[in-house]
Amino acid sequence: MDNIDKELLKTISDLEETPTGAYNIRKNGKGIERKVNSNVNIVSKTDVSGIDVIVKEDSKLEIVHIPVIITESGLTDLVYNDFYIGKNANVVIIAGCGIHNDHHQDSEHDGIHRFFVEEGAKVKYIEKHYGEGSGKGKKILNPLTEVTLKDGATMEMETSQIKGVDSTIRTTKAILEKNTTLVISEKIMTHGTQFAGTNFEVQLNGENSSAQVTSRSVAVDESRQKFISKILGNEKCFSHVECDAIIKDKGSVTSIPEITANNVEANLIHEAAIGKIAGEQLTKLMTLGLTEKNAENEIINGFLK
């Protein structure tokens, strides 16, 4: 790997050296490095491009890195990754994709991830997206994540779009059985003429299942964002969806909620707030010596933390 590769890995997965746990590093559509251990196996698919990540039951605090980097202009990379998490396992999975494009052709990565989380297992999934490069070719990322949580399972997802992604449609679908918990935290930054679309569809099928979705986003310049959430409460359950956004210049954010209660004990909540940076916040920071632009950046960075 060259310096560009290393910087991309550092940005999307905080990797500055070889990770200690299991890992699979993908570059320009091909796996280039892999390591497994006694609790985590990573197997290449034979019918399509992608991997199976298998975590043994009762595994304790395993950490798995599966970053993707693209430095080839004009490449469209489609990958299918399946995660099989055994009963009572505890695992952190760090994914993410970084694209460096210095040329005129578009570069695109579409990752289809399916999680099969067995009874009592706990998963934390971290995914960062980032684009850079001096070329006019677009950086495009379209992730699709499908989650199935069995009895008593928990999954926490942290997804963030740092900057530089010209177009993205982010789709997450989840099916929750009884006594399960899904927590999703999304952070998106768009600028220029970029577009980011988010689609959440969660089916709360089991008694005492719960889902919490929090989206924080900033749209500046002429960028556009659309947030769509569809929650179905089919049993005694709880769900809370919150979409907060800051717009600046000619930025645009749309939030579209759909909540359906098919059970009298389904408790479903959706909240949305979209607005500009508060004037009193700017004034307070500027009295401390910051310029208006630096004060705005300080507020935005704090909002997306």
Image (spheres, rainbow, N blue to C red):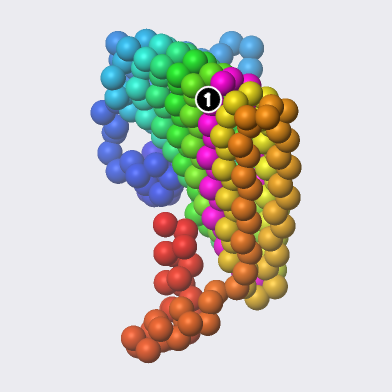
Residue 212 visible within the image: yes
Q: Residue at (59%, 11%) from the top-left corner?
A: 46
Q: Tell me where residue 258 sits by quadrant.
A: top right
| Mark 1: secondary structure | loop
Residue 157: x percent and y percent? 48, 37
Q: Could one spot residue 98 in this view of the protein? A: no
**Looking at the picture, does residue 207 appear above or below residue 251?**
above
The amino acid sitting under disc 1 is: Asn
Quick check: is 160 in the magenta stretch? no
- Residue 13 on image: x %, y %: 39, 42
Q: Main structural element of the magenta stretch: helix, strand or loop?
A: strand
Q: Is 151 or 13 nearer to us in this picture?
A: 151
Quarter of the image where the C terminus is located = bottom left
The answer to whether 297 is drawn above or below residue 169 in the figure is below
The question of residue 198 being in magenta is answered with yes
Asked whether 21 or 157 is in front, the reply is 157
Which of 231/287 is in front?
A: 231
Spot the residue most to the front. 264
Judge from the rendering whether residue 221 lies leftward or rightward of residue 23; answer left or right.
right
Picture coordinates of residue 138, whole percent (x, y)? 66, 53
Picture layout, residue 52 above or below residue 258: above
Q: Residue at x 26, y 28 (%)?
A: 20
Measuring 63% from the left and 17% from the top, which residue is drawn there?
A: 48
Q: Is residue 17 left or right of residue 247?
A: left
Percent across and percent down for residue 131 are 54, 52
Span of residues in magenta: 197-221
Residue that badge 1 annotates? 208
Q: Image height check: is 207 above or below 246?
A: above
Quadrant of the snapshot with the N terminus: top left
> Mark 1, residues whose alpha carbon is within 10 Å: few (<14), some, or many (≥20)?
some
